[in-house]
Image (cartoon, grey):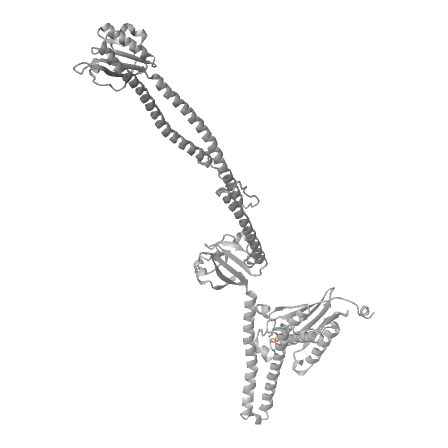
Amino acid sequence: MKKRLSIFKSIQFKIPILFILMLLLSLQLISANFIRQLESQTIDNFESQLELHYDFLKTNVAQVLSSAQTVEQKETAIYQLLQDASSRGNVEIRIVDRQGYIIGTNDQTKQSLVGTKATDIRLEKLTLKSRSDAIQYVDQETNERQMRIIGPAGVDENQNPLSYIVVDSNIEGQYRQVRNIAVIFFNSSLIAIILTIVIAVLISRGITRPITEMVEQTEKISEGNYSGSVHIYGEDEIGLLGRAINMLSVRIRDAQEASEAERQRLDSVLHHMSDGVIATDRRGKIVIVNEAALDLLNLNESDAFGQDILSVLRLPKKTTFRSLFTKQDQQIISYDSSILKCDFSVIQRETGFISGIVCVLSDITEQQKIEAERRNFVSNVSHELRTPLTSIRSYTEALSDGAWKDEEVAPEFLDVIQTEANRMIRMITDLLNLSRMDQKRMHLEKELTNMNDLFNHVLNRFDHILKQDEYKEKNYQIEREVTPTDIWVEIDQDKMTQVLDNIMNNAIKYSPNGGKITAHLEASNDRILIFIKDEGMGIPRRALPKIFNRFYRVDKARSRQMGGTGLGLAISKEVIEMSGGKIWVESVENRGSIFYIELPYEPFSVSEEFE
Ligand code: ADP
């Protein structure tokens, strides 16, 4: 993610360039003005000097010419005059008459030209009444620039000039001087530019170095590395920025640590929650899912993560993601064999922006089952109590309507009332027992018991019952398969007797045509197995899973007629399970049933006990 700046974009490059450009611009302005001024000043000075020459000679020449009578006198006097003037620098002074003939020159080498016509002076110039401006020209011989002033000297009676003074001087030296100064100026400028570049580079490095360090530090912070800090080079604005970045780094680290701790807490809460939690982003894609949710939905994390919550929860087609966060209600869904409660709530920021939804899943299968059982139980109890009460009421009504007087009917009616009342009492006793078991208020009164004796005792009682007249003709036989080895076990004798009674009772009740009832008792190393097998009507396959449910009866009318309450097997199951055992049934309809009881067993000899 690190992005390196190209050198041309960096401040380190821009600042020197800016300095140089500014310096060049100012040098350009200064130099243009300065050189021009210098040049014009120098030329002006030079011109003034030439003018001085002219002014000096003007009066003297006029006097000399007016006092001299002959040409020779004139020339001599002029020569004298010019000798004095020749000492005045690099100036060529010539005096010419109105026709352009040279009267005198200060140049010793050109004395031969005196009396000749000056070829380089145009005649029209000689009509001047006053001094000409200085003119510049290039000497054809030397090819150097010259400056010239021409002016009249002396006047005749008609006020026409008598002669002219021509002052020439080589001006190339002045130009050279200006050029030299310009060269010095440019050299100095060059040195200034080099110095400026050095200073600008140093300044820009001074600025960019801390900035580069700050960039590196902020990059480290963005990558989650809070270890370093920016070096503070000074207390200027950059120094303050550096301090602010260091402070920011500390704050971000603290905030990061706090949010990390918060995240770990949340993770641990989510991990240990028994409820499932699913959180989505604002498009409904799952971003958080805890293990409980995965277990409830029977999914792997990869199957859920990033998936659409609607499809993962298999919500009805008409449910949209928007409807989940606008209604935020609760939904009960059937998921495979479970019933799940989904509580939806919206994750909303303070600004109102919705960033997703959270769904808390709880498995309410058991709860729903218990609820259904409870409703069923209440309706069963009401119904079961109502039936005997209704018949008691109708018989008592009949008796009070006069049937009590009928000696034949009255005892019969009273007998029915008594039977129904007894059945109700049995039922209520059974219900109370079950309720105590449900509330864990019932405890087993365990005592060391010889199981063979208890088993035989129950069977003896049934042998005796079956000898009674009402069972005689059906020819019931109880076949005992009781192990000869004594089985000593710690059990609640009354409750175990109640269980065996109930199963034996059922074997007889539901074998309307009599038959053999096999009662089996055996013990292995760690368990006691009892089964009671009859050859009766059996139990239909569909009824087998419900046979131990409270009030469940295959044939309600028949059971009631036999005085059954529909609670016997439910109580038996509770008692056996409380004793750490299990009870189950195998049955084929119209062929008979086998009820099995298995109890935990720790074999020990009685002699050991009493030693
Ligand atoms: P009940 O008081 O009706 O006998 P139980 O809980 O003892 O209640 O038995 C529940 C139901 O199981 C009975 O109504 C009957 O339909 C069925 N059942 C129990 N034992 C047998 C059996 N040995 N043969 C056939 N059906 C049986």
* Observer-nearest of 403 and 487: 487
Q: Residue at x 56, y 89 (%)?
A: 396
Residue 281, horizontal then vertical, whole percent:
48, 54
Q: Is 316 rendered above or below residue 539?
A: above
Q: Which quadrant of the view contains residue 462? A: bottom right
Q: Which quadrant of the view contains residue 496? A: bottom right
Whether residue 569 is visible to the viewer of this picture, yes or no, is no
Outermost residue on the left side: it is: 158
Residue 422, horizontal then vertical, whole percent:
62, 83
* Observer-nearest of 591 and 186: 186
* Observer-nearest of 95 and 282: 95
Q: Quadrant of the C terminus?
A: bottom right
Residue 401, horizontal then vertical, whole percent:
53, 92
205 relative position to 50: left or right: right
128 relative position to 590: left or right: left
* Observer-nearest of 312 and 511: 312
Outermost residue on the bottom side: it is: 405
Residue 143, horizontal then vertical, whole percent:
32, 13
Whether residue 163 is visible to the viewer of this picture, yes or no, is yes
**Quarter of the render that holds ligand 1:** bottom right
Q: Which quadrant of the view contains residue 109? A: top left
391 relative position to 171: left or right: right
